[in-house]
Amino acid sequence: MDRTHAIQQAAEDIRNARHTVALTGAGISAESGIPPFRGKGGVWERIDPMEFATIDAFLKNPAKVWQVLFLEMKQVLDRAHPNAAHEGLARLEQSGHLRTVITQNVDGLHQAAGNTDVIEFHGNFAWQRCQTCGQTQPSRELELAAMPPRCPCGGLWRPACVLFGELIPTTPLQRSQAITAACDVMLVIGTSAVVEPAASLPALARAAGAKIIEINPEPTPLTRRTSHYLIQGKAGEIVSRIADQCAG
Ligand code: OAD
C-alpha cells in the first residue's frame, strides 16, 4: 500500500470506528524540536539512561542527574510548541473522531494543542514533586540557583514523571488498559514500542479486535506482528492529512 492510499485507508478506518484512541511516543514531538530517546540523535545515545534516568541514580547523586539530564530537558521543553501532528490529533477530537490520547511523553504538547482527554502514562515534566513530602510546584517556578533544587522541607525536587525503576501510577495504567480494550482503532504514533508496559497496549487492543495503524518513519517491533499497517513517514504530515480527510 503506498502512502497516499494508506492515509486514505486510515481516514476511512477512523470514520468507520466508534472509538479511536491514539498512543503516542517521543517521535510525535520530534518536529517540535524535542529529540527522541532512541535512534540517531536520540538522548540515550549521549546519556546512559541507567546512569542518569533511574530512581536509584537520582537518589545516589541528585545534583549530577539534575545537571546532566533534567536541566537539559527543562530547557528543551520550556521552548517547545505543538507541531502539525499534535494539532492534527486535536482536530480529530474536535471533529468527533478521537476520544483519548495515551501518551508516553512528558512535554504536555497534546494538551497545549487542544486535546482534552490525555492520559500521561509517564507523568508530566511541567510539574515538580518533592521526593520527601510529596508537595508539588510548576517547573517554571523552580529555583535553580543551587543544585540539586530542594523543597522547603529539605527534600529533593524531582520532575513529576516516571523514572526507570518506578512503577506507572495506578490510575493512568488502569484507565489506559480499559480504554485500550474498548477501542476499535488505535493510532500508534512515534513510539519505538520497546518500553513496557506502554509497548503492550497495541497488542491488548488488537486482541480485543481493534485495528492498529502505525505512523513512524521506521518499522518497529509492532510492525507486521501487531500493526495492521504502517504509514511510513513523519507524524506531522501524515496525521495532518488524516485529520483533513476525516474533516472533509
Ligand atoms: P523512542 O525515542 O524510543 O522512539 C521514538 C520513535 O519515534 C522511533 O520509533 C522513531 O522512529 C520515531 N520517530 C522519529 N521521528 C519521528 C517523526 N517525525 N514522526 C513520527 N515518528 C518519529 O521514544 P518512545 O517510544 O516514546 O520513558 O520511548 C518510550 C519511553 O522510553 C519514553 O517515554 C521514556 C524513554 O526512556 C521514560 O522516561 C520512563
Image: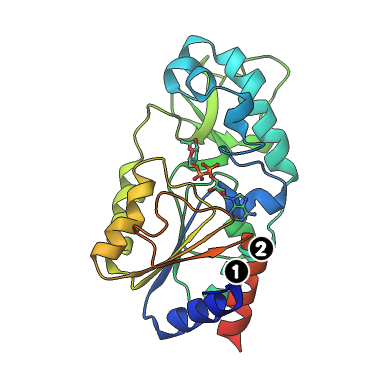
Which is nearer the eye, 215 or 168?
215
Residue 10: x and y in percent read 49, 76
Q: Is residue 94 left or right of residue 18?
A: right
Name which residue type carries label 1: Val
Residue 69: x and y in percent read 62, 25
Say if disc 2 is inside 8 Å of ligand 1: yes
Query: Does residue 129 lie above or below 219 as drawn?
Result: above
Name which residue type carries label 2: Gly
Q: Which mark is residue 87?
A: none
Q: Which mark is residue 236?
A: 2
**Res. 40 in view:** yes
Mark 2: secondary structure: helix
Q: Which mark is residue 239?
A: 1
Query: Does residue 129 lie above or below 14 as drawn?
Result: above
Residue 184: x and y in percent read 33, 73
Q: Residues within 10 Å of mark 1 (few under 14, many from 20)?
A: many
Which is nearer the eye, 130 or 34?
34
